[in-house]
Image (tube, rainbow, N blue to C red):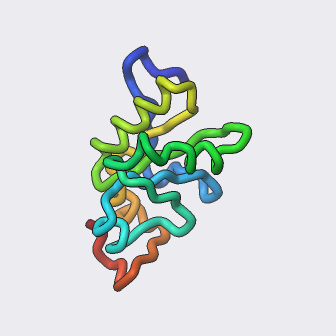
């Protein structure tokens, strides 16, 4: 499925493959509250300066699934990545949808509540 030009590909949290590269663009306090195991954390506010970390993890390509709290920031980052030629997919509904879908969470405290 190809998106309409100017639109970002999206998927729901339940459809993100278990072995997918997940890029979490939330801020540090949100990340600490609860996150997907194995996700790469680069806050949106630091993304341009730290984009090389993602490039390293991507290797030969493959999609990167971008997530934030509800989907707004991740859609912006996914759009930016798409313009750079990266196969980027926004996780619609963000970590709130991830949690609602019963996907695994870990956190620095009790990850029962994602911020």
Q: What is the residue that sits farthest to the bottom in this orientation?
A: 109
Q: What is the residue that sits farthest to the front in this orientation?
A: 49
Q: Can you say which quadrant of the picture contains the N terminus?
A: top right
Q: What is the residue that sits farthest to the top in this orientation?
A: 5
Question: Which one is in front, 33 or 57?
Answer: 57
Residue located at (26% from left, 66% from top): 115
- Give the x, y percent position of residue 112: 33, 78
Q: Quadrant of residue 71?
A: top left
- Give the x, y percent position of residue 68: 34, 52
Left or right: residue 34 versus residue 11 is left
Question: Which one is in front, 38 or 2?
Answer: 38
- Give the x, y percent position of residue 63: 60, 39
- 109 versus 47 height, above or below: below
Q: Quadrant of residue 105?
A: bottom left
Q: Quadrant of residue 64?
A: top right
Residue located at (56% from left, 65% from top): 38
Residue located at (66% from left, 39% from top): 62
Left or right: residue 69 versus residue 65 is left
- 57 versus 18 height, above or below: above
């Amino acid at each position: 499925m190809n998106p309409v030009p100017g639109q970002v590909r999206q998927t729901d949290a339940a459809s993100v493959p278990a072995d997918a590269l997940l890029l979490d663009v939330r801020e540090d306090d949100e990340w600490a509250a609860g996150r997907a195991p194995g996700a790469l954390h680069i806050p949106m506010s630091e993304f341009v300066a730290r984009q090389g970390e993602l490039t390293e993890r991507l290797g030969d390509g493959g999609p990167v699934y971008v997530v934030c709290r509800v989907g707004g920031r991740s859609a912006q980052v996914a759009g930016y990545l798409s313009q750079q030629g990266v196969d980027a997919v926004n996780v619609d509904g963000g970590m709130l949808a991830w949690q609602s879908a019963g996907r695994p969470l870990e956190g620095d405290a009790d990850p029962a509540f994602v911020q």
